[in-house]
Structures are given as C-alpha cells and as structure tokens.
Image: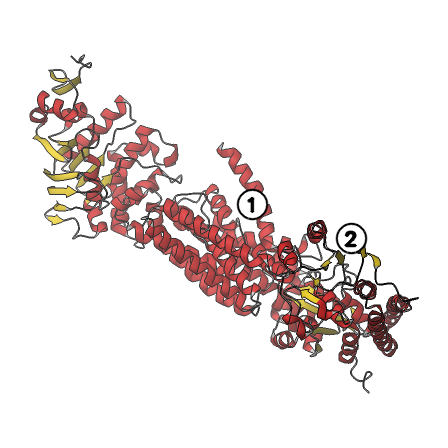
C-alpha cells in the first residue's frame, strides 16, 4: 500500500514537473507534446526542455536517496550522507578548477566527476594509512579531512578569479538541473540503475553490518570488504549525480530518515523506497526552483536545503 | 496581424531608443567642446566623490582597470604605465608592464613597490579600503567607473586633465563620438531586429539593460530582448528566453557552432533558422576608445546589406 | 567441538602477549566457562575466534578444522557468537533481527526457505521471546535484549554458542534466567562457551572452568577443582575465602575486607 503511494508520488511529481514552469501547459498539451502531435513550440518545450530536465532530477534524487540510505546503514550513523568521503569537496574542486581554466562547458561535469573519484580514493587511502580498515569512524574522519583540503583548494582557485568564473563556479556548486539533455539522461539512467542494483545486492549484508562490526564479523560478514563496497558504490552514485546536476544537498541525508519513519525496516526496503522518495523530492524541488521567483531560477541545492532545515529541526526536537 | 503591430511597436521604441542614444552623443559633444586649455596642475572629482589635486603631470601611473588602461594608451600616456591588472590585454605593448594582480582589492604593497605618483582604481566598494590606504601613503589615487558610454567621455576627459594630455583626450572623444553618430545615423531608419546577446552558459547569462554593450547594440540598430532588466549581465532562464523569442542570437564562433547542433538551443526559432551571428564580446572589455569602432562593426554584423560601402 | 591449542596473541606495540599458550576444549553438551580478572585475556580469546585478533602461535579448531581454513560464513553456520555489547543503530523488528541470524546460510541473495523460517521460530520459542516478536529492538529492556540476542545466535543453527560477558548490566533475576537458558542449551547438545567475570554464577552452572591469569591458564577443571582459595587469591590479588553452601550446591567465592597492612 505504501509502495503504491510512493510510486504515485513519483508519477505525480513528474507530471507536475512537465506541466508547470514559465510556460504553463495543460495535461493535454503535455500528452500532445510527448507524442509529437501538438504545436511545435509546445512539443519542443515538452520534449527538449521539460522531460529531460524532470527525468534528470528524478534520477539524481533516486541516486542520492539510495546512496544515503546505504551509507547510513553501513556506517551505523544516521547523519551519514552521500557526500561523505570527500565527494562534494572533490567534485566542487574538480569543477571549479575546470571553470577557472575556462574549459569548454561539456568538460566541467567530467572534471567534477573525476574530482569526486579522486577525493574518495584519497579518503580511503588516508583511512587505511590511519589503520582503519572497516572502522567507520576513521573513514568518516578521513572524509572530513579530505573535504577540508578540497575546500581550501577551491578557495585558492577562486581567490584571484574574475567575476564570471566565480559566478559560474558558484552556480555549479549550488546545483541545477538546467543543463539536462537526453544524452545526459540516458547516461545517468544506466549509471544510477547499476549503482542502485549493487547497493540492493549488498542490502542484507548492510542489515548485519548495522548491528555492529564485531557482531557482523561473528556472523560471517567480511566487514572490511562489504563496507568498502558500500562506500565505493555510494560514492560513485553520488559522484554521478554531482556530475549531472552539481551539488544537491540534504536529499541523501533526509530521505532515508523519512523512509524509516514511514516504517521501512530492512535495507532492501529502505534503499528501494529511498530511491523512489528521493526521485519525487528532487523533481518537486526542481519545480519549485523554476516557479518560485520568476523569471529567475533558484538553485536546486538551495531549495532542497530550505526544505531540509525545518525537517531536521523537527527531528532534533523529537530526539531531545 | 501581430506582425505589423510588433513592427510598429519596434519603430516607436526604436525612435525612443535612438533619442536616448542621441542624448548620449550630446554629452560626448559637450565634453569635446572644452574651453581654454587647462593648466597642468588641476583638480578632479572622482567617482567616490573625492576631490584630488594634481600638482604636476604624473610620470609613473598604475592603472588597475583594463578600460582606463586602454584609455591611457589612447590619449598617449601609455608609456608612463608602471602597473596594470592581469586582465589588461590591449594594446599588445601593455604586456610589458608589470602585472599587479586582479584589479579588485589590490595588493597595496605591490602597488606601492612600483613607486607610482598616480594610481587609478575601479570605483567599487571593494576598492575603498585600498584607495584610503594608498592616500595615507601619500600617493595620488583616483577611482573611476567606466561602465557606460557616457562614462567613457567623462573619464577620458578627466584622465586627460590628470596626465596633462587634454588635447589628445579631446581628439579621442571626438573620434569616437563621430563614429557613433555616423553609425547611429545609418541604422536609425532600418528595422531593428530583437536580439539575444549570449554571454555565459552556466548559469545562462545575457547582456542586460545595464551594460554598455546594450547601448552599443542600440547604436548598431538592434533591440535587446533583455533591455528591461537593469543588471548588466543578468541570469535568465531558458524558458523565459524561449518566451521572448528573439530574432537573432549574438554569440562567439565556438558557441555558435555548439548552439546550431544542440537540440535544446534549436527550440529557439532564431537558432532553427540559423540566425546566430558571431560577435566576440571578449574584444570589448568596457567602453574604451574602441567602442565606436565596435559599434560600427556590430552594425555591419546586424545589417550587412545596409552597412555596405 | 571448539579447541584452543597453545593459542598465543600479541597485540602490536605491547610488551607482554595478551594470550600466551592457552589450551582447552569446549565440547558439545557442556557449558565451558572462561574466567579471570580484567586484562587476563578473556575477551581476546573471543576476538581471536572471530578473526579480529591474529594468532602469533597455535591454532583454534572447530570440529578439527582450523578456523582460518574455513570461510567466515561457513564458520558462522557452526559457531554463533554473542559479543559483549551490541547497540543497534536502527529500530529493526525483533523477528527480523532474529531472522538476520540466518545470514550465514542465506548469503546476499538466497531467498528464505521453510527451514529458515522454522529455525527462527524455534529460536524464538526456545528463548521465550514470542511476546517480543513485534517490538523494535531499540525498545527492549536489557534483559529482553539479551534474550533476543541469544535467539539470533540460536537461529544461526550452529552447535556451538560463544558468549562474551552475557550478563553485564542485568539484574539478578535476568542473570539467572540467562544462565538457566544457557544450561538448557548445553543439555540439548550445544557446546556453550562462556566468558564471564561472574565467578559464583559460573561455578553453579559450568561443567568446566578455565581460569586465565595474564594470558595463561592458571587452573582448569570442574568448578570444585578450580575454585580453590589459594589460586584465586593469587590470581585476583585480593583476600578471599571459598565457601560451600549446601543450599547453593556449588563453591562460592567471598571476598574479604582489606587486611590492614603491617
């Protein structure tokens, strides 16, 4: 029953996302646009602007939701989120350096992706050097260290840069689904589906790992390898979403909480539901970003943060 | 039906737009009609409202604004430059002048190390502190904002008084004024296409109403679809652009190639029809002495037939 | 069933070994208890069994096969381990939690069979936790949580159960309940290996006791053999007497007030 509601929420969000915007389309026009039978302007808007954008937002949300759920389980920490392990810092660093060097626009997301991967690799290396194979706290701390280093690099890159570079870098860091294209959507779809599949495969092991590392070892879980698998798959998912839409915060942190509050218990359920809920959330956030303050567009990351902060305040009060 | 109404609206707005352009030229003309030659020691009021007295023509000038650097070369004072910003590229000789970093929040020590007797800053709040500290070190400091065509005339005249090259300044202002006037005269009667001037991809930035490029566009016989936005380079959304439906898109050569092939950009009528014209904005950093020639060349891009010969 | 054969463990950066030549057996149908003061190496034994501490000498054998040879998962189907502390991060349901005990059999992707469901039901019945089955594990009291953990271990289906300090934080009633359960498991044929500092409780339930002192076996045998005043005083470095109360039916250690020196 709850699954039905979730799927309905995603579908409604997608339909609303395609219907609403600077140009308002009726459901009939949307249908005509998709089938190609409507007026050329509407068909163009539906096919080339709205649909890719909405689908990109959905994929980004699914990837972030699933990654966040898996990481919270594997690290036994409900404050874990996909941008752990230096992903956000590394991605921002890669993208900002690309923007500062005035690389062609198509290369910036790739640079972000490479930066994210580099940061994750560095984090895991630092954790291993500190002796923390499988110890979640050491990995988390290594991620904080790498993230801090990346932030320093970003500040250096932006310090002497001219106005348009700073603007472009900031825009990227605030997140946006505006640069969606069908090629990008196809690529991200494959990527996100594979990533989520891997996490679902590890779901049962995550359930055991969530009981504690010693207990899990006693039950036959290869703690170091499973943890590593979740970190890498989660980080790759996050890096892919970052390459597609910049930094979109709070989704990976918030959505697993919502899903667990709604009664999801085992990680197979938690991860799947988080993917769906994340998709619905980001599609709605993108819609709000587009229609809140016309004709300007709010950054996607700002909308998700605005949605996330009151939720967390409420959560904090309940915990206290 | 909508077509003709649009055209007549174009025409009346064009007339109003050109009225403003003519007013700008009048300012230029006034500035050009200087009275008697001014003595070498002069007093100017800069854009921070500070009054500065210059006893004798400066020998070592630091210019931390690409536009004022170009203006100094135009009035013949370029040889006295001992410091510039990283972004100063024109004319080629400026590369030999020491690079003192970005113009905003300059390293005051580095500036002082060149022992200047005149420093020209960009008049933004970021530079107030630097202006104060340079003055405290007894270095004559003036701050100017050269963002609009009217600024060009005013600041060129002021620079002429500061450096003692008043005659050269007058000639520069005159030449530019004449070129602008000639271009405006040629384009006034032509139908003004609605233009989207692309600046940056992510975020999508356009030339807005507050930019001198917008003024140039008017002189060149075009109408900016974002004329109503007061910022010089506002961020706009693609859907909004789609709604405004420009006739022409102005962009650099590489951007043009990308746009013509990109299905998202092809949702714009102008792109589908191939009406993407090349005009490189990186050439024009600010309204310098080249602004007249640039406007003329832009007019040739927009109205190739009418501007021939 | 579980044999520790001359086991030695040395932690890096430590001068003295944590375990230095420990040998004993924990056979089926018996409750074997390892006791000793803090730092004697009791917990290291369990960690070595789980593979979290490396042996510098000797071997640990389960049914004759060294522990390193078998995969950890296969080992977990034979030996279930209840660690000292387990603080769940998420509110899993009790039945789901006990069901996780089947992980060593199911792995990542095998579906649950009827045998798996039966094992879970049996474990819940044995530990009398049926009334808790629908509660969340984060809502249980200390005693309830211990019983549920035991259920999970039983659900693993192995013949050996190893427990590290299972009654810390439990009150007298719950302590006794847990020990009665362990006793029943041993009678049913399991090899129960227990690490505990509760000498007196252990003495009443264990079939064999192993007294560790500074990583070595100071005494081993039946409770009557191990609970000797001299040895215990030396190991625990505190004046005490060992009494025999007929009502209790087992030797009991009673620590004395400190003797005034000199």
Classify residue C171 as left or right of residue B105: left
Q: How is the image coloured?
A: secondary structure
Q: Position of residue A231 (x, y in %)?
A: 39, 53
Residue C147 appearing in the image: yes
The crowd level at tag 2 (other Cα within 10 Å; few <14, some 14-19, many 20+) is some
The crowd level at tag 1 (other Cα within 10 Å; few <14, some 14-19, many 20+) is some
Classify residue B61 as left or right of residue C236: right
| Chain letter for mark 2 | B
Q: Residue furthest front?
A: B56
Q: Nearer the viewer, residue B65 or C91?
A: B65
Q: Which residue is mark 2?
A: B48
The image quarter containing residue B243 is bottom right
Q: Nearer the viewer, residue C71 or B102?
A: B102
The image quarter containing residue B205 is bottom right
Could you tell me how far apart the alpha carbons at marks 2 and 1 are, in whole angstroms? 43 Å
Q: Position of residue B295 (x, y in %)?
A: 78, 74
Residue C135 appearing in the image: no
Identify the residue at image location x=33%, y=40%: C95
- Tag 1 secondary structure: helix
Q: Which residue is mark 1?
A: A308
Q: Nearer the viewer, residue A136 or C111?
A: A136
Q: Is residue B177 above or below residue B203?
A: below
Q: Position of residue A315 (x, y in %)?
A: 52, 38
Q: Quadrant of the C terminus of chain C?
A: top left
């Amino acid at each position: 029953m709850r699954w039905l509601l979730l799927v309905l929420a995603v579908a409604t969000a997608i339909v609303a996302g395609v219907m609403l915007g600077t140009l308002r389309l009726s459901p009939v026009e949307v249908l005509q646009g998709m089938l190609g039978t409507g007026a050329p302007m509407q068909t163009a808007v539906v096919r080339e602007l709205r649909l890719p954008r909405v689908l990109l937002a959905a994929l980004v949300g699914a990837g972030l939701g699933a990654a966040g759920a898996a990481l919270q389980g594997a690290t036994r920490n409900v404050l874990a989120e996909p941008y752990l392990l230096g992903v956000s810092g590394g991605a921002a660093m890669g993208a900002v350096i690309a923007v500062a060097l005035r690389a062609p626009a198509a290369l910036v997301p790739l640079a972000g992706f490479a930066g994210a991967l580099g940061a994750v690799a560095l984090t895991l290396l630092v954790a291993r050097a500190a002796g923390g194979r499988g110890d979640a706290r050491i990995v988390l701390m290594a991620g904080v260290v790498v993230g801090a280093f990346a932030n320093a690099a970003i500040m250096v890159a932006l310090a002497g840069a001219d106005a348009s570079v700073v603007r472009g870098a900031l825009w990227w860091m605030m997140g946006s689904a505006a640069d969606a294209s069908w090629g990008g959507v196809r690529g991200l779809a494959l990527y996100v589906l594979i990533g989520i599949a891997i996490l679902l495969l590890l779901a049962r092991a995550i359930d055991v790992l969530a009981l504690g590392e010693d207990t899990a070892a006693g039950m036959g879980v290869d703690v170091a390898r499973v943890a590593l698998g979740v970190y890498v798959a989660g980080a790759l998912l996050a890096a892919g979403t970052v390459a597609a839409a910049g930094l979109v915060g709070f989704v990976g942190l918030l959505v697993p909480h919502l899903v667990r509050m709604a009664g999801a218990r085992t990680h197979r359920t938690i991860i799947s539901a988080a993917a769906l809920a994340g998709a619905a959330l980001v599609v709605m956030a993108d819609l709000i970003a587009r229609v809140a303050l016309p004709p300007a567009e709010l950054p996607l990351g700002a909308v998700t943060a605005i949605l996330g902060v009151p939720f967390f305040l409420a959560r904090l009060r309940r915990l206290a | 039906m909508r077509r003709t109404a649009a055209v007549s609206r174009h025409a009346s707005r064009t007339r109003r737009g050109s009225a403003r352009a003519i007013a700008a030229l009048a300012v230029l003309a006034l500035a050009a009609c200087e009275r008697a030659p001014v003595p070498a020691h002069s007093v100017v009021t800069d854009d921070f409202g500070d009054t500065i007295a210059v006893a004798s023509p400066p020998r070592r000038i630091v210019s931390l604004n690409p536009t004022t650097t170009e203006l100094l070369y135009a009035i013949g004072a370029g040889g006295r430059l001992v410091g510039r910003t990283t972004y100063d590229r024109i004319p080629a000789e400026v590369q030999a002048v020491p690079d003192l970093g970005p113009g905003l929040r300059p390293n005051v020590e580095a500036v002082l190390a060149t022992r200047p007797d005149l420093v020209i800053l960009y008049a933004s709040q970021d530079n107030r502190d630097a202006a104060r500290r340079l003055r405290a070190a007894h270095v004559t400091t003036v701050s100017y904002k050269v963002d609009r065509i009217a600024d060009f005339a005013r600041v060129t005249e002021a620079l002429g008084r500061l450096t003692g090259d008043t005659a050269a300044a007058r000639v520069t202002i005159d030449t530019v004024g004449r070129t602008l006037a000639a271009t405006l005269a040629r384009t006034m009667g032509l139908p003004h296409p609605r233009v989207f001037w692309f600046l940056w991809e992510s975020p999508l930035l356009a030339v807005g109403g507050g930019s001198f490029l917008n003024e140039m566009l008017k002189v060149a016989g075009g109408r900016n679809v974002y004329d109503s936005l007061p910022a010089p380079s506002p961020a706009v959304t693609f859907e909004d652009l789609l709604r405004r439906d420009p006739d022409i898109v102005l962009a650099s050569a590489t951007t043009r190639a990308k746009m013509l092939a990109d299905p998202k950009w092809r949702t714009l009528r102008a792109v589908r029809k191939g009406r993407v014209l090349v005009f490189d904005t990186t050439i024009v950093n600010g309204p310098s002495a080249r602004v007249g020639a640039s406007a003329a060349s832009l007019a040739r891009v927009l109205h190739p037939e009418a501007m021939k010969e | 069933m579980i044999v520790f054969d001359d086991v030695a463990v040395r932690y890096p950066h430590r001068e003295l070994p944590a375990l230095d030549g420990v040998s004993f057996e924990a056979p089926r149908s018996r409750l074997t208890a390892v006791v000793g003061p803090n730092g004697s190496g009791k917990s290291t034994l369990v960690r070595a069994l789980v593979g979290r501490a490396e042996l510098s000498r000797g071997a640990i054998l389960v049914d004759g096969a060294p522990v390193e040879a078998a995969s950890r998962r296969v080992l977990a189907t034979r030996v279930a381990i209840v660690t000292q502390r387990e603080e769940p991060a998420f509110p899993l349901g009790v039945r789901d939690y006990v069901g996780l005990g089947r992980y060593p059999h199911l792995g990542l992707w095998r579906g649950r069979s009827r045998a798996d469901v039966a094992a879970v039901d049996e474990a819940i019945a044995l530990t009398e936790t049926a009334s808790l089955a629908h509660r969340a594990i984060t809502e249980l009291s200390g005693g309830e949580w211990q019983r549920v953990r035991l259920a999970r271990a039983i659900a693993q289906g192995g013949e050996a159960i190893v427990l590290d300090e299972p009654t810390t934080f439990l009150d007298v009633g719950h302590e006794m309940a847990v020990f009665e359960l362990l006793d029943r498991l041993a009678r049913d044929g399991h090899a129960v290996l227990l690490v505990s500092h509760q000498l007196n409780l252990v003495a009443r339930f264990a079939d064999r006791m192993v007294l560790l002192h500074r990583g070595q076996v100071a005494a081993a045998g039946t409770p009557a053999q191990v609970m000797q005043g001299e040895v215990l005083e030396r190991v625990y470095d505190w004046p005490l007497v060992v009494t025999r109360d007929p009502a209790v039916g087992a030797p009991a250690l009673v620590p004395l007030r400190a003797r005034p020196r000199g």
